[in-house]
Image (cartoon, grey):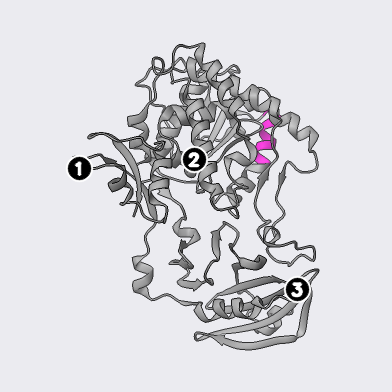
């Protein structure tokens, strides 16, 4: 969702709702800021941001919600000539960031974690603070060679592979702002919150939610949070206390500002949660993609990580799997395709034709540095699907892992594809007889239902719910 918002608007009343166009036809910031060199920086990186975060998330009511929040903040900006392009990213990662020239981004994953409009406003105001203070320009000067790392391990197996992190190296990573810049953006953000009429303590609440999210994710030490907010916005008790100190300038906690909870919940009801249909779904040890009509299983104790550029899986003993697909444009034999130069360290003598559940396939082995690889390619219509399995040299797990992938890879039946449904945020009212446990039992897509229910509703241990409260659950 992209709209250009200029802070030359009059101060917004609570009933104000900005006029916004559809995502497919946004007001182009390049035209609004055609003489601003900072906008050119943001424009250059914008397509890479979209590619790394699954593109734009398009839902009219969610777009309207974010535009309403951003509009209230731009009205109190310190720089009345600054326009902003707000994009909701179609990613389950929890993140928000800014690029020079007023390009602001928030993921649908962050919207799912937030609990009211003021918390989203707190995040956007913080990012606007970075733009206002020209932090992006300062960072650009320090890192002229590359603001955003964009090297993707896609076509070539690198010879410097160093374990599962290297196989997942194709993710965008924003260079972190300095601690001083983060604290300066905090101060600007809290001031904007208060002046826009939002609860200035929302920054405190969201930082605490992020701390809870960090604890939730830390249960899995292998969880990769490189696309998430905490990787570029380090949390600390000191930051929370400083945010609270700034908020006190507007009044006592709970007695000042609007949280905007009801219209926020209306705006995210039905929000896509987790994997998107375009990227396929992870269900336990299985990856399923209805659009491509394929599925496969990974061995027990492996964790699947569904990324934009590929499906990654990691397991015991530093075993790693990468799965992706490429268009079959040349229609060459698969044995020729494997040997066409995209695999470093390939042993040509190991190339074999085979068949995978009725589909033409080929396999080979490769070695690079301290790692051995199994390479399996499968042709289905106009696609070539590729499995890369990596194990430390000498590991006995290579054959068994690759065999599991090959034997389980198959086409889905039309009925299987039809039954696949994405998970969404559903806003429900607490009914008589409901409690935290019964509501959590309705959660789908996680085996840690109670923990996740408390997390997305900011309910600490021991907190209760009352009849008539509105809460979020995750279901189809």
Residue 340 visible in the current orientation? no
Q: Position of residue 346 (x, y in %)?
A: 76, 78
Give residue 393's mark: 3
45 left or right of 56 in image: right
Number of disc labels: 3
Q: Outermost residue, left direction?
A: 432
* Part of the protein shown in magenta: 35-44
The residue mark sitting in front, 3 or 2, is 3
Tell me the tag on residue 433. 1
Between 389 and 33, the residue placed more toward the observer is 389
From the top left corner, tell me how far across and down residue 126 is, in percent: 57, 27
Q: Is residue 53 above or below residue 266?
A: below
Q: Quadrant of residue 188?
A: top right
Q: Is residue 164 magenta?
A: no
Which sits in the foreground, 420 or 66? 420
Residue pointed to by mark 2: 110
Provide residue 288's location: percent of width, then percent of height: 46, 67
- Determine crowd level at label 2: few under 14, some 14-19, many 20+ residues with C-alpha closer than 10 A: many
């Amino acid at each position: 969702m992209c709209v250009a918002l200029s802070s030359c608007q009059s101060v917004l009343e609570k009933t104000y709702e900005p006029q916004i166009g559809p995502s497919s036809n946004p007001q182009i910031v390049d035209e609004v800021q055609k003489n601003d060199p900072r906008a050119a920086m943001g424009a250059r990186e914008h397509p890479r941001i979209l590619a790394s975060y699954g593109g734009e998330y398009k839902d009219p009511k969610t777009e309207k919600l974010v535009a309403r929040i951003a509009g209230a903040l731009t009205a109190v900006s310190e720089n009345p000539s600054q326009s902003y392009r707000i994009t909701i990213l179609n990613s389950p990662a929890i993140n928000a960031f800014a690029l020079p020239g007023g390009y602001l981004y928030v993921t649908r994953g962050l919207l799912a974690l937030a609990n009211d409009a003021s918390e989203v406003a707190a995040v956007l105001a913080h990012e606007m603070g970075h733009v206002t203070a020209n932090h992006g320009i300062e960072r650009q000067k320090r890192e002229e060679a590359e603001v955003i790392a964009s090297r993707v391990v896609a076509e070539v197996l690198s010879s410097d592979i160093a374990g599962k992190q290297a196989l997942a190296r194709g993710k965008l990573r924003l260079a972190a702002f300095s601690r001083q810049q983060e604290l300066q953006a905090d101060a600007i953000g809290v001031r904007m919150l208060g002046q826009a009429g939002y609860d200035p303590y929302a920054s405190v609440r969201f930082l605490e939610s992020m701390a809870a999210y960090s604890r939730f994710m830390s249960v899995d030490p292998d969880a990769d949070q490189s696309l998430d907010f905490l990787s570029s916005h380090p949390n600390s008790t000191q930051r929370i206390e400083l945010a609270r100190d700034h908020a006190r300038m507007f009044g006592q906690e709970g007695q000042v500002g609007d949280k905007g909870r009801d219209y926020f919940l209306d705006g995210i009801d039905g929000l896509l949660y987790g994997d998107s249909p375009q990227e396929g779904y992870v269900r336990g040890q299985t990856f399923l993609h209805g659009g491509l009509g394929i599925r496969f299983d990974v061995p027990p104790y492996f964790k699947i990580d569904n990324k934009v550029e590929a499906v990654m899986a990691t397991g015991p003993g530093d075993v790693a799997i990468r799965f992706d697909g490429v268009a079959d444009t040349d229609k060459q034999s698969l044995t020729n395709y494997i040997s066409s130069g995209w695999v470093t360290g390939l042993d040509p003598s190991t190339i074999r034709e085979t068949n995978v559940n009725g589909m033409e396939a080929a396999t080979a082995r490769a070695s690079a540095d301290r790692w051995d690889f199994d390479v399996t390619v499968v042709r289905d219509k106009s696609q070539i699907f590729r499995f890369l399995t990596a194990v430390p040299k000498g590991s006995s797990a290579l054959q068994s892992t690759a065999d599991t992938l090959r034997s389980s890879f198959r086409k889905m039946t039309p009925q299987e594809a039809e039954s696949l449904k994405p998970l969404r945020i559903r806003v429900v009212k607490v009914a008589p007889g409901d409690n935290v446990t019964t509501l959590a039992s309705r959660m789908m897509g996680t085996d840690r239902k109670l923990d996740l229910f408390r997390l997305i509703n900011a309910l600490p241990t021991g907190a209760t719910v009352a009849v008539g409260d509105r809460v979020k659950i995750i279901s189809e």
